[in-house]
Each structure stands twice: as structure tokens, then as C-alpha cells.
Image: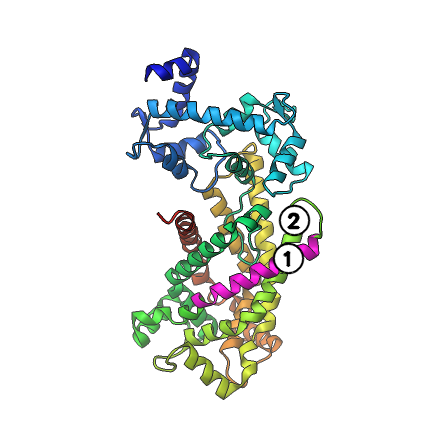
Amino acid sequence: MSSEEELIISKEEEEKLKELFNKLDVNKDGRIDINDLTQALSTLQVPQTPGHAKKFFDKHDKDRDGLIDFSEFVKYVTDHEKKLRLYFKKIDTNDDGSIDREEIIESFKRLGVVIDPNEADKLLSKMDKDGTLKIEWSEWRDYLLLSPSQNINEILQHWRHASMIDVGENIIVPDDFTEKEMKTGIWRINLMAGGMAGAVSRSCTAPLDRIKVMLQVHGTSKNKYGVINGFKHMLEEGGVKSLWRGNGVNVIKIAPETAIKFMAYEQFKRIIHGDASGELAVSERLLAGSLAGATAQTIIYPMEVLKTRLAIRKTGQYKGILDCAMKIYRHEGAAVFYRGYIPNLLGIIPYAGIDLAVYETMKKLYMKTNENKDPGILVLLGCGTISCTAGQLASYPLALVRTKLQAQGAKADSMIGLFQKIIKQDGLTGLYRGIVPNFMKVIPAVGISYVVYEKSRNWFLDPS
């Protein structure tokens, strides 16, 4: 340690920092690497946002060797404390040495984020250790000491999103963007990153998606068409390339569907929530999201039909997406492009409702049973995976009937008639034909989507 650092840090403070450093140095080799920090942050119950440890290293590992020694750690703490004290004074507008509810509301308002007194109290309770609903300097310092944030805006957003970040939610309910994020264009980056994540995720899990469609359309209790022999049949009929049939249109429809859903969601939010301050309640988000999902599905639904037809086609049947659309139109008419639309629409509400309700319930239960510990990214992804699975279980019969209707030719069944036929032929289990490969793709799809989203979002923010 340099003489300059010794003058700044007292012996008592140095001992405290050494104690904290040792807690972060999980493998006890005298240096902190990214694995040490990730594990220690969870153990110490430090509030985290996705990529927290990496962001910390990117900003504070000055020699870029992937390690932080004690001298680097002391330098970081010294510099970071000065910034934290400056930001504390900026928020403490009445200069009484503590931050209260009104000062928090005003600080977020300057960021373009409107929060109500209840939310302000929840944020205060994250730092407030003595129950006064006021934040003293020591509480502020302890809570944000290991935050990677570099300015007052980042500090406030880190504080808020460490408590409220939602990962893994059903795509029917889009993300909420703040007024600040809308003005700065961050929402565009998030949507582009989400589109890339969806494209990569869908492409990686496309073989499972195609076997699901094949089982939904062709599988019965009599022909014993299952996952393994289904894959064998597809490989024998069209080779490895055939496993990705229908994936092209599945990827192409991401951009228009996302854009329509986002614009519709923003409009429905204003209609439902009006000019009231604060964030949307879960029920309001569900309603706005369901209506936005229905709007997007109504507009892009013909692409859903094309995806199904391309997935079940035989080798050489169609030259491509346009050829498929033209042949279907000539032989079956325009109405075929909305076949199965009603069960598709009916499936949105139970899917979105159960997914969102299970996700919020599991997250709150985790925080309650872990003494309000902020859930890490793995917990959030786990909640998202389970809630998505629960939503699929509730809506899957409608999805199966929709796919069967999309695949049928000119003489198609009615929705009710098809339900009756499936139950008569295969029983209630027939309504869940193809659900195994559907579940098989959930975990890899969630994992791939998250990784690609984070990587692409970081690249869009800093292409260098």
C-alpha cells in the first residue's frame, strides 16, 4: 500500500477493509477473481443485478489481469466512497445528514421515474437497518460499497432494479420502460437485444420445436409417434437440415411481432393506468400485456400458419416461404391464414396470467423466506422457467388445437369438433401430445436467451 493510501485510510478502517476483502476472497489466495466475487456477493446478500460481478471487474480491474489484489481493492474503496458521499449529499437536499422518503421521490423524479410513497418506503427499507425509514451515511455506504455504478443516475437505477428487476417473464407481457429510458433510446437497444436473443434461442431449439409440431399434427395413441421415432422419421425423410424447417419464418416474425406488441402495450398502459403516478400493478400489466399480445397476434397470425405448414411439409413440397404462401392461397383461399386464430387468442390470457402470477409469487416467496434477500439471476431465471412451464400447462390444449387447425386442408374441423375428436380418440392426455419436447426446450431457451440478450445489449451500448 502506498503512503498516500495510508494517510487516507486509518488503521481501523484498513482492518475493516481487510476483513471485507477476506470475505470476498473465497478461495483465500490473496486475490479476488470474478468467481470469488460472484459467490461472495450471494453469500453476503449484496443486492445484485444481472452481470453485476462482470461490470464490477470491467470498471475496477485496472491492470486487466482478471484479479483484484488488496491494494487495488483499497484504491477502489477510497475512490468509490468519495463518489458515494458526494451522491449522498446531492440526494440529501435538506442537508440533515439523512435521506427520507420525499428526497427519494424527488431524486427519481429528476431521472424521469415516477414512484409513489409506498415504493419509496420499500426502497428505503432495503438500506434502512434501524427501522427509522431514513438512510444514514453509514447505511448508504454499506449498501452501495460493492455497486459497480459510476454516477448518480446509475446508483439510483442500481438501487431500484436490484429490488425490482424481472427476468424470464412471459414475452406476452413486455418490459416496462421509464420515461428516461424512452427519451434516451435505451428501449430500442433492449428491444434489439431481445430480438437477437429470440432469434438465437429459437434457432438453437428449432429441432425440438419442429418435433413438437409433428407430434401435435401427426401423433395419436394408435401410431405411437413419439419423440425418438419422430426424430428418426424427420432425419430419414429430409436429413439433418430438415430439423430446422419452419424456423426461418419463426425468426423473421420476431421483429414485427415485438414492435407491434411494444407499441400496443404502451398505448394500452396509458388507457388502463391513465395519468396515475407509480408503476402498473400486476393485474394492470397482465391486462395491458394480454391486449398487446392479442393485437400483435392478430396482425402477424398468417406467419404463424406459414410456420406450421413449413414445419410439417415434405421435402420438395415448397421452394420457400413465399412459394408456400402462394400455393396455400391458390388452393385454400385467404381465410386459411387465420385458421386456428380463436384458440390461439383464447390461449393468451391463461398463459400470460398464470405465468405472471406464478413468477411474482415465487419471487416474493423467495424474498420472504430469505429475509428479503434480493434474488440472484439464477433464482430469477428459475422462477421464469417454472412460471413459463406452468403457463404452458394451462394453455397447451388450446395451442395443440390451434396447430392442428393450421395444418388442416380445405375441409377443416371446427375448434369444438376437434376438441371432441381428440378426447374421443386419445382421451384427455391427447390434448397434451407433444408437450415433452416443448418442456425440453424451456430451460435451454431461457438460458440461451438470457446470455445472448446480455451480450448483445452490452455490445449495442459499447460496440468497441
Which residue is the site of mark 2? Answer: 280
Task: Say what amino acid the circle numbered 2 marks.
Answer: Leu
Q: In this image, 232 relative to 199: left or right? A: left
Please, is residue 321 above or below residue 411 in the view?
Answer: above
* Residue closer to the observer: 143 or 108: 108
Quadrant position of residue 174:
bottom right
Residues at marks 1 and 2, CA–CA distance in whole angstroms: 9 Å
- Which kind of residue does numbered mark 1 sit on? Ala
Place of residue 293 in the rendered image (x, y in percent of width and height, measured from the top left): 58, 62
Taking the spot 40% from the left edge, 24% from the top edge, the residue there is 23
Asked if one can make out residue 289 in the rendered structure from this viewpoint, the answer is no
**Disc 2 secondary structure class:** loop
Residue in the picture at 40% in, 69% down = 248
Residue numbers of the magenta segment: 251-273
Query: Which residue ends up furthest to the top in the rendered image?
Result: 11
What is the crowding at mark 1: few (fewer than 14 residues within 10 Å), some, or many (at least 20)? many
**Residue 303: x percent and y percent?**
49, 72
Whether the residues at callouts 1 and 2 have beta carbons within 8 Å, the answer is yes
What secondary structure is the stretch in magenta mostly built from? helix
Residue 403 is at least partly visible in this image: yes
Quarter the N terminus occupies: top left
Looking at the picture, tell me which residue is in the foreground, 323 or 75.
75
Q: Quadrant of residue 57?
A: top left
* Residue indicated by mark 1: 288
Q: Answer whether residue 253 is magenta in the image.
A: yes
**Is-magenta flag for residue 240?**
no
What secondary structure is found at the residue carrying circle 1? helix
